[in-house]
Image: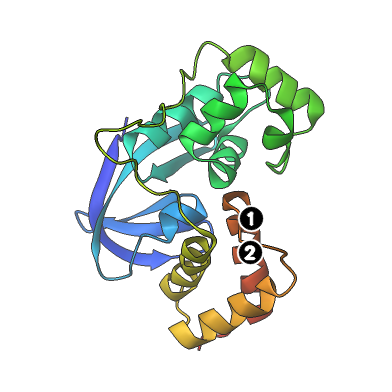
């Protein structure tokens, strides 16, 4: 079991990164939010889960151990494989998934590509007692960290494009162009879609 990888980031792609570990480039599948934190040439640590199949070994990477645990837990649901589990974490944070399951919020689960009404119902039924409760809001005492704003999420998409090789100005223009069709602040579940749309608009070139 490969529990984590630490090394220099050699490449960042739309759905994966290459991290050099002991002279070997490890291909790690990850969510857009995790990939947005990586920078080519810098050292990074990813918590990982190795999925073994008869014809493949696939490494999935996460920003923290909680994401990895949720990734592995949701795969205990019938019909949920690693790709769908990763898509769930691309749309929702770990606590967002816990909240959706605890509240039986089927619409929130259906925002994940590949999950329909029956799949959402099955996820709620099978994960009800497995994911645990979402973290409670802090009342008094230590201030609760502010939730990412629409501007923060917009910058997250720009940073992801920069990490993929475009310069900041080109990345910002692409994101602005995509967001012209988005009403209101950018929601967390819209970040992956905006990133994909911006990449399509940019095509294969680099600024």
The mark found on residue 144 in the picture is none
Q: Residue at x 39, y 49 (%)?
A: 146
Q: CA distance from mark 1 to mark 2?
A: 6 Å
Residue 191, position as x, y percentages in the image: 58, 58
- Label 2: element kind: helix
Q: Residue at x 35, y 30 (%)?
A: 139
Query: How many marks are shown on the rendered structure?
Result: 2
Q: Is residue 196 visible?
A: yes
Quick check: 48 left or right of 58?
A: left
Locate residue 3: give its quadrant.
top left
Pick whichever, 75 or 98, lies toward us: 98
Q: Are marks 1 and 2 in contact (CB under 8 Å)?
A: yes
In this view, the residue farthest toward the left is 22
- Label 1: element kind: helix
Q: Is residue 167 visible?
A: no
Residue 38, position as x, y percentages in the image: 35, 61
Quick check: 115 left or right of 92?
A: right
Q: Residue at x 29, y 41 (%)?
A: 143
Pick whichever, 124 or 185, lies toward us: 185
Q: Is residue 55 above or below residue 100?
A: below
Locate residue 119: give its quadrant.
top right
Residue on which the image places disc 1: 190
The mark found on residue 194 in the picture is 2
Pick the quarter of the image with the N terminus.
top left
Q: Is residue 83 above or below residue 173?
A: above
């Amino acid at each position: 079991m490969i529990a984590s990888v630490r090394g220099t980031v050699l490449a960042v792609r739309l759905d994966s990164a290459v991290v050099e570990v002991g002279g070997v480039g490890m291909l790690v599948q990850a969510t857009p939010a995790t990939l947005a934190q990586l920078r080519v040439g810098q050292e990074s640590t990813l918590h990982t889960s190795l999925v073994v199949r008869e014809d493949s070994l696939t490494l999935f990477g996460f920003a923290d151990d909680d994401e990895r645990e949720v990734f592995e837990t949701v795969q205990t649901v019938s019909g949920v494989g690693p790709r769908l589990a990763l898509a769930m974490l691309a749309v929702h944070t770990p606590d967002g998934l816990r909240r959706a399951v605890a509240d039986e919020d089927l619409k929130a689960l259906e925002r994940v590509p590949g999950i329909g009404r029956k799949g959402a119902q099955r996820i709620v039924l099978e994960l009800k007692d497995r994911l645990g409760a979402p973290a409670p809001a802090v009342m008094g005492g230590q201030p609760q960290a502010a939730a990412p704003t629409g501007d923060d999420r917009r910058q997250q998409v720009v940073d992801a494009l920069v990490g993929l090789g475009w310069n900041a100005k080109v990345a910002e223009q692409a994101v602005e162009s995509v967001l012209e069709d988005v009403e209101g602040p950018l929601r967390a579940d819209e970040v992956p879609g905006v990133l994909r749309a911006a990449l399509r608009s940019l095509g294969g070139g680099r600024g």
